[in-house]
Image: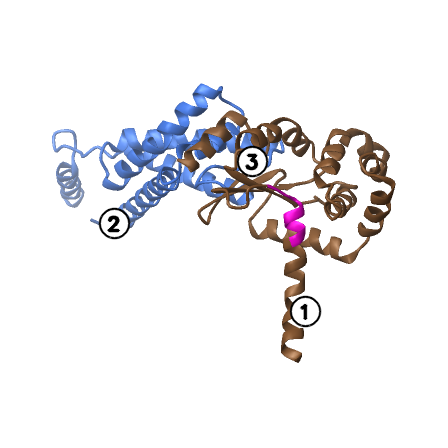
Chain colours: A brown, B blue
Amino acid sequence: MKLPVFLLLALMPSVVFAEADRAKSFGNPGAPLTIELFSDFQCPACRALHMQQLPLLIRDYINPGKAYLVYKEFPLNMHKFSREAAAYACASARVGKYEQVADALFQNQPSWEESGKVFEIVASVLSPAEQKKVQALAKDPSILQEINSDVQEGQQERVNQTPTMIIVRGGKKYPIGGSLNYDLLRRFLDDLLK
Amino acid sequence: MTFSSRAGWAIHLLLRLVVGGVFVYSAWTKLREPWSLFAISVDAYHVLPQWGVLAVARTLPWAELALGLLLIVGFWRRVSTLAASALLALFFGLMVRASVHGETIDCGCFGPGEAISPWTLLRDGSLLAGSVFLAIKSFWRKKPMSPRAGGSESLIEAHVGDGRNLTA
């Protein structure tokens, strides 16, 4: 009896993280390409990518089922409110609102970066019930563990800047960092899909 | 061949093989991947318009391969060492520029995923120094002295002659 309980406990974190990953993923999980996007809510280049290139990427590759997008948190220590924003975003994923919260955080980055009022922005896209849940969840150790796990994964993948996209095709990984020219990224993704 | 000239020849050969080998390896890391991946690395430096980025991404790996092979084989030494030095000086200058501007971009030296760092600057700087040394050596060769112009044989004769004069 003890062994199945032990196995269950041992597998729990991976099940929790797999669930969390699904809540922060978009598109067809069976797509030929997987794009892991390591980003920081307080980083200006991440904001530019989120607002300019990501909608195009979603239109051309995620929605047609060519690529599967997985968001990963990579809050940099140099940014004062990055971890707090990441915690709210991960907590929002648990109530199915990751995309909306991420949009709000990136769109209003200059304002909360200056005021420090991160939750005000997060709350603006949540219902009162969701707000309570997200506020409580953001302090949950499992959320902090989820962020740390993403950061560790990024470090293992040698992520050295934000944003960094790790494009996975047939087990092979291609890290692409920094602000991107969408036309060149499109050429590369099309080459991988050939 | 004296010990010093033999050692110099060995160092010269080793340096040529190292610089040439690095060029071939660098070309291979780019040619085995879709060329558009290297185009993204070139674009990150923000020095070329898009048509220039595409042209460089398509041709530079082949140029690196050709230069590397020329250096290893030892053909056209002046041209190959000079071209390698010019190319390495350009890469090094661009990396220093990005570093000074605080840009954390991929160096693009051996495929993606290697950011510009003190280590990459040291590595490329050392390669540049080695290549410049090879270029200087290929242009600056000792001219063999002909007997008429006072070559080694006439020098010995002159020395012996002087000795005779002294003992007489």
Q: Chain of mark 1?
A: A
Residue nearer the viewer, A144 or B161: A144
Task: List x then y, in percent, for residue A66.
Answer: 50, 37
Q: Secondary structure at mark 3?
A: helix
Report which residue position mark 2 lands on. B6
Task: List x then y, in percent, for residue A131.
Answer: 85, 43
Tell me, for residue A9, which label it has, or none: 1
Residue type at mark 1 is: Leu
**Residue at 28 percent of width and 28 percent of height:** B79
Magenta residue span: A19-26
Secondary structure mainly formed by the magenta segment:
helix
Tell me, for residue A62, which label it has, or none: 3
Instruction: Determine crowd level at label 2: few under 14, some 14-19, many 20+ residues with C-alpha closer than 10 A.
Output: few
The quarter of the picture where residue A25 lies is: top right
Circles 1 and 3, Cβ within 8 Å, touching? The answer is: no
Q: Secondary structure at mark 1?
A: helix
Residue type at mark 3 is: Ile
Task: List x then y, in percent, for residue A167.
Answer: 51, 41
